Image (cartoon, rainbow, N blue to C red):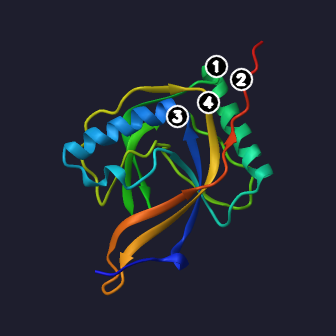
Amino acid sequence: MVLKTQKQHTDMFLVLVPHRDARLMMRKYSDALFKAGFSGAYCFPWVTPLAAASRPLTADELKNCARALRDASLASGGKITAGEISAVSFHGEALFGPRLDISPNAFDCKKIASIFSPLVIGACLMPDATTLPPPPKLSFRAAAVANMQWRPVQTENDSRVIGYKWKIGKLCWLPAVRKK
């Protein structure tokens, strides 16, 4: 079987990258999902897709998006929490993970094509809806936004998608929460 990466089908996304402690908890959750038979548990990084983009965002555009997310988190003291399992349509499949409690009104960037709703931290990518075990409860203040490139990996002879490749760009951290 010959594999190829479809470079002409690279998609660009704006993602939220939680602090490494939260990603470690998500990794353990994906481990448990995989052991329980959910083969899509490692098909997506432990990040939250925020929006589809027409091109990579610049450093200034990423800073503006980071500021918008921090502003959306201020109602809870700058803390972002995630709890119940939810799913969002991603690239023709269902992306499952803990749903975030924030929802930015909009991102001020012309490169943003569409915003995902609900916002979930990726734990498992499946072809259709299913029932997953409850995710861990997460809470974090430290997070970053970044560009993410996404490509399907296909067999050359029959073009079946057998996996995905992604690359997460330079992180732009959300501003610190100012104490009053």
Check disc 2 and report its element: helix, strand or loop.
loop
Image side of residue 115 versus residue 46, left or right: right
> CB atoms at circles 4 and 1 under 8 Å apart?
no
Which residue is label 3 attached to? 20
Which residue is label 1 attached to? 77
Under mark 3, the amino acid is Arg
For the residues marked 4 and 2, what is the alpha-carbon distance in whole angstroms?
10 Å
* Quarter assignment of residue 13: bottom right
Give x and y (percent) for residue 6: 48, 77
Give x and y (percent) for residue 172: 70, 43
Which circle's residue, 4 or 2, is located before the other in the chain? 4
For the residues marked 2 and 3, what is the alpha-carbon distance in whole angstroms?
19 Å
Whether 161 is drawn above or below 113: the answer is below
Check disc 1 and report its element: helix, strand or loop.
loop
Query: Residue at (66%, 45%) from the top-left corner?
Result: 171
Which residue is label 2 attached to? 177
Which residue is label 4 attached to? 142
Which circle's residue, 4 or 1, is located before the other in the chain? 1
For the residues marked 4 and 1, what is the alpha-carbon distance in whole angstroms?
12 Å
Residue 88 shows in the view:
yes
Q: Judge the density around disc 1: few (<14), some (14-19), many (≥20) Cα neighbours within 10 Å.
A: some
